[in-house]
Image: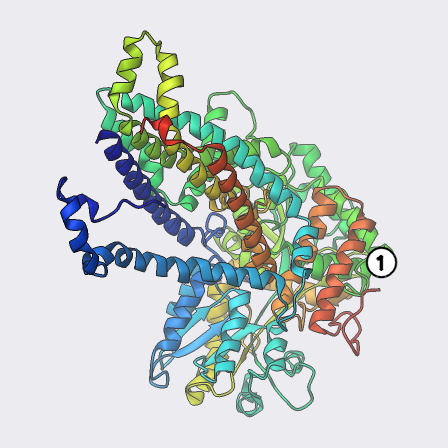
Amino acid sequence: MALPNPSADVLTPGSVQDKRGARRPRRWSLNSAAPYLLLAPSLLFLAVFFAWPMVQALILSVQTPEGEFTTQYLQRMVSDVNFSDAIRNTLLLIITVIPIQFVLAVIMGLALQAKPKSASFFLYLWTIPLGVSDLAAGIVWLAIFGDRGFLNSVLTGLGLMNTPFAWLSYEHPLSLLAAVVIAEVWRATSIVMVIVVAGLQLIPPDYTEAAEVFGATTWQRLWHVTLPMLRPSLQVALILRTILAFQVFAVVVALAGTRMPVLASEAYNWYGGNHNPNVAAAYALLILIFSLVTTGLYLRALRTRDEELGQ
Amino acid sequence: MRPRVTRLATVTLVLLALVLVAAACGGGAATSSAPSAPAAAPTTAAQAPAAQAPAAAQPTTAAKAAAPAAQSGPILFHSSQFTPVAEREKMQNVILKDFPGKVDYEPQDPGPFVDIAEAQAKAGKMQIGVIGGLHGDFPVFIKDGVLDDVTPLMTKLQDRKFPATFVELGKMGTKDKQYYIPWAQATYIMVANKKALQYLPQGANVDSLTYDQLKAWGANIQKATGERKLGFPAGPKGLMHRFTQGFLYPSYTGQPVTNFKSPEAVKMWTDFKDLWQYVNPASTNYDFMQEPLRSGEVWIAFDHVARLIDALKDKPDDYVTFPAPSGPKGLGHMPVVLGLGLPKNGPDRAAAEQLIDYMTQPKTQIAVARELGFYPVVDAPLPTDMPAGVKLEADAVAKQSNAKNAIQSLLPVGLGAKGGEWNKVYQDTLTRIVLKGEDPAKVLDEQAKIAQQILDDTKAPCWAPDPVSDGPCKIK
């Protein structure tokens, strides 16, 4: 990541030339080492709690307790009855949930950008799910979609149904998927929205004003000015959301139990219930690979050149 | 200058967002470690993985291990039982209340339960005072030399009058060594709402039902009410695999492990799939059958006694209890025996022995029956003021084990940490044949390979009712 030169900002323009010679002996002064010192704790944290466990997981998934290389755990994972379902369900959730979330988040962001009277109220309201743990969110939605949940009570109360409908039954995979999608959209749209709002606020009004002067319609301004300027924010949001979507777990488990295996729930089941950390590690590895590949694809596909930002 | 400021601000904001997300993820991960919370309502688990994730469970023990002077501290009661919060609290605050010393009751999921004890033994720092678990939990500890012989303590406790079969089980196949003192017993039974009785098929008696009659019963109810009122605990934390392992399989095949993919097993699965059409489809959500029984969603249910007790205590007059149905080979049923063992080099042996003495006193045994639905293993007649629900269960348990055609089927023995994968074999078989409609013979063939692999890996000999084998148990 390109970090701004930390000492450049403290120099006053014009003095750069004279100070350059004087700066050299101070290379290892506290001031110039500061950024690295400040970064060190987080790097150490990442190394100890992310990089090292990742390496360990990799080893765990291909090594027998005796220390020999093996593919038996990967084979066990692939041949398992839930494997293809887990991949299918995870991908299905990603391709349904993420587009909905982005459309909603952009709409919400634009609505806030228009500065309606109660903008800050809505901003707070829409970010509430951000503060709710995913399991709690799952349980809330379980109370809605359960056989004796609020939805069934309302529908039967209004006389639209005679008997409660089992939304979450294995016999109705579509309504089960829809319930999980709705819960996921509710839970995780706000994080996208926060990033979009931040991105929108960074777009200098000059551009939109200029477009307006040239007679661009609202739609044209959105399509040709706002969205391209928003691309870096969308990229970050997309990467975050996709990585998180590969790890989707608590909401699915709360709503669907064992009827809708996803990658993360399988990893959990293999570790916890089946007590086989090796196969669990194989799943973790798979999630990691998926996340890396999609992140790489996003970075390539959504590359933003500086000129496009007018810089 | 403006674009530069914008870019800096973007980077800062994005970083800020990342930190926020990371924080959110951290929180999420911590809470998501309890996926069963919605289902694991206020109640009981016999040996299901509990709500806490292993990751969440370990720190507590780690903290404990780090505590110095374990000798003077409380006795650590390490257990695979009573893991749900409500049960754990009853154990700690009711059952152990009158013990003269201080005890820390620490229930664990099956995985960490084994790992923690083994790790402490390996490190030579045994902090555990007493190990409590299922009969099937013990072989792995014996194999790895974690447990001490408790014969001297058994001699001291002779006045408790443990049933000879349980004492024999506690020897774990050895002649002169006792590895655990029997602690409590339980099993699985059937419960029906009295409303269902009018639909019993002609000539059927609830106390000696066959699986065919159970199916006809469910069919009659569906015809009359339009609803599927049979229920099984096939939820994420339910004990459905115990039903297939210890009830269905022995009833149809006589030798549940060796005949895993026999023609009898194929017939059994075909029959059971047929029966499933009268089973409430929400069964795949049920972890504890007392919940749907109470709500009336289900009228006829099978489950562990500890997972039925709340419904029976609540409205004992609404229900009848009865033994599981019989199949062509007899009435397969699975008694659950819990035992208490002592680890080698535990911190305070005298206190630990005193704790086992306390746990096996008739008064404590009756308290466990009253609070947790596990029945005495000592000569302790249930007092007359026992809740009616407990009596209902005790009746069915007695009828089931005394049935003329009873086939006693032990919980898996000697599989150690692979017990979870063993259960998965049965869960997956049910999912594939009954829920997904795959061909029984083909599924059994494939699942038998996985099951055989587990038996080979653990070198577990066959356990009752399969005839004892010399080497690892072999599926025919």
> Residue drawn at (45%, 39%), measured in percent from left and top?
A239
Other-residue count near label 1 (Cα within 10 Å), few / some / many at <14 / 14–19 / ≥20? some
Q: Quadrant of the C terminus of chain A?
A: top left
| Residue A82, horizontal then vertical, whole percent | 65, 48
- The reply to whether residue B249 is in sight is yes
Q: Is residue B269 above or below residue B350?
A: above
| Residue B10, horizontal then vertical, whole percent | 30, 36
Residue, disc 1: B262
B41 vs A77, left or right, is: left
| Residue B152, horizontal then vertical, whole percent | 55, 92
Q: Is residue B225 above or below residue B468?
A: above
> Residue drawn at (33%, 34%), measured in percent from left and top?
A194
> Residue drawn at (61%, 71%), measured in percent from left and top?
A65
What is the chain letter for disc 1?
Answer: B
Using the rendered view, name the quadrant where residue A38 is placed: bottom left
How many circles with numbers are drawn on the protein? 1
> Residue drawn at (34%, 34%), measured in percent from left and top?
A195
